[in-house]
Amino acid sequence: MAKELVFGHQNPDTDAIGAAIAFSYLVNQLGYDTEAVALGEPNEETKFTLDKFGFNAPRVVQTVSNEVDAVMLVDHNEFQQSVSDIADVQVSHVVDHHRIANFNTANPLFYRAEPLGCTSTVIWKLYHEYKTAIPKEIAGIMMSSIISDTLLFKSPTTTPTDEIAVKDLASLAGVDYEAYGLEMLKAGTDLSAKSEQELVDMDAKSFEMNGKNVRIAQVNTVDVADVLKRQAQFTTVINAEIAQDRYDLFVFVITDILNSNSKAIVLGSDEAKAAFEHTFNQTITDDVAAMPGVVSRKKQIVPQLTAAF
Amino acid sequence: MAKELVFGHQNPDTDAIGAAIAFSYLVNQLGYDTEAVALGEPNEETKFTLDKFGFNAPRVVQTVSNEVDAVMLVDHNEFQQSVSDIADVQVSHVVDHHRIANFNTANPLFYRAEPLGCTSTVIWKLYHEYKTAIPKEIAGIMMSSIISDTLLFKSPTTTPTDEIAVKDLASLAGVDYEAYGLEMLKAGTDLSAKSEQELVDMDAKSFEMNGKNVRIAQVNTVDVADVLKRQAQFTTVINAEIAQDRYDLFVFVITDILNSNSKAIVLGSDEAKAAFEHTFNQTITDDVAAMPGVVSRKKQIVPQLTAAF
């Protein structure tokens, strides 16, 4: 069987990398020949997780069609969030927990999505369905992915299945998931060493919404005011990206993971900003809008903006 | 939980109707409130199956947004093959075995596709995963769907899983699947009572292929020459549809289910017909091309034409 690559989205978070490692291991047990790779370097939280469970960071690839004919996507499906030459290879498998958009294939494929809190929760179900034992280290990285995506069950994306999976995986990994989870999330909130450019790009995704080109970036912190001290520099970086990539709207979401609130720097066309204000019933003052109770881009921002446009 | 409708594609075949009935029953057992409906009347083969296992034909709907906010799709995903107002409702679930194209959602969803011979085979797996007992009649209609889609395992789309599922379901239904399957397939090949318009529309699907509008219809028979006696009338009907719906290419595939061969009436633009000839390495003579060994639209026609365009 020809080798395939398995990878998550651009600007990988812990689930994009953890799900790739976990799914690659699973399908290799089932007879496929795959390698987990990544579309970028791991962030601080993911590095903490990889170190903890003894993994090296996956090899970073810029293109895939020079290596393989077919790929497996985890934690994304939208082509603009995937590898640059995704249209040149066959997508044989997808495991995901997002909406489906800007995705198409010429051939039937294995596609498994469920509206759960994390792709690694879906993969945890697949291990059970395929009666495949989960090694201790793989359990640790899948658990970390679910804790990351659900903010330790505080995100409204969390489902009972995510909690069951974390408890099962924590027991396999031999970890106290609550203590470990807080430590891991905190490792991801040390933003001081990062440049404004790095923070704006770190967890940013593009969305096509009825012809509008929307970019939504997110950082987690325990001190929103501290991050907003750098607003002027963020604005410069974001306006340069808007000019270069012609975004109609750029939303940079700063999420307080302790209190489950966000503030956002919102830049773009007047029309798009008005749509944002109307959608979230918030005024943008000096380019900043409050987003009370909002922590999930997938559930609390993307569908609402998609409907608005 | 608000009621949802479950349905297969336009011009329903046995799997489009059987999978809707089987998936609706499964999710109702899991706590959803759904009704299986159809986007058209059952064909002769499906009527034979519904009669055999004691089902009425599902209610035919033209629109769904007047009844429900959300729907579940089986055996299709491409919007142009779905209900006319599919863009006005939320798609909460999809179970399918086709390529993904012209499909998008604003929200995360349950999407389950596998490259198996039949959607009902995927649903058979779901019954097992959710540990839900399959009633005798539901087993009968799922078995019939798989036999129909795989032409009793003769289609190249057939996988070992399809065969295992049919044997399991036949045992639950208390039916000799080989004798029953031949009888059922033969019931679907009595084309004499149908008008040319009915035969051209009966199992026809539209595909968007890189901007080209392609229509592929298929009928099964045990006597291709007998069907081709009506070529002049088919051509009149097809040319009228090309003029009305602006198809670039219309392929009417007449499949010999005993010998696993097809002939096709091919009409459309010179450019599209040339692409067809090149793709299948066949000459179109008097609007007819041989398609030796071809029985599966999904596996042997759609991917090849998609690649060509």
Image (cartoon, coloured by chain):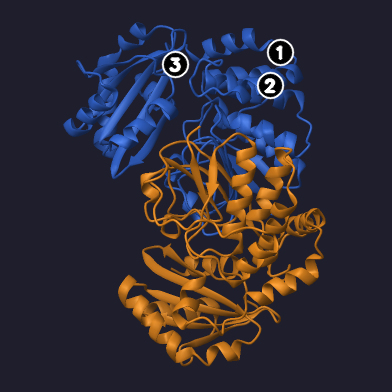
Chain colours: A blue, B orange
**Circle 3 sits in a helix, a strand or a loop, which is it?**
strand
Residue drawn at the location 58% of the way across and 32% of the way down: A119
- Image spot of residue B283 (x, y percent): 51, 87
| Badge 1 amino acid | Val
Q: Chain of mark 1?
A: A
Front one among B281 and A192: B281
Give me the C-alpha separation between circle 3 and circle 2. Answer: 21 Å
Residue drawn at the location 33% of the way across and 71% of the way down: B245
Labelled disc at residue B252: none
- Image spot of residue B200 (x, y percent): 47, 77
The answer to whether one can see residue B176 in this image is yes
Labelled disc at residue A220: 3
Labelled disc at residue A140: 2
Q: Chain of mark 3?
A: A
- Is A1 on the left-hand or right-hand side of B21? right
- Is A254 on the left-hand or right-hand side of B6? left
User: Which residue lies under the disc numbered 1?
Assistant: A175
- Does the residue at mark 1 contact the one at mark 2 (Cβ under 8 Å)? yes
Q: Residues within 10 Å of mark 1 (few under 14, many from 20)?
A: some
* A290 relative to A274, above or below: above
Give me the C-alpha separation between circle 1 and circle 2. Answer: 8 Å
**Circle 2 sits in a helix, a strand or a loop, which is it?**
helix
| Badge 3 amino acid | Asn
| Badge 2 amino acid | Gly
Of the 4 image quadrants, the one containing the C terminus of chain B is: bottom left
Residue drawn at the location 34% of the way across and 23% of the way down: A252
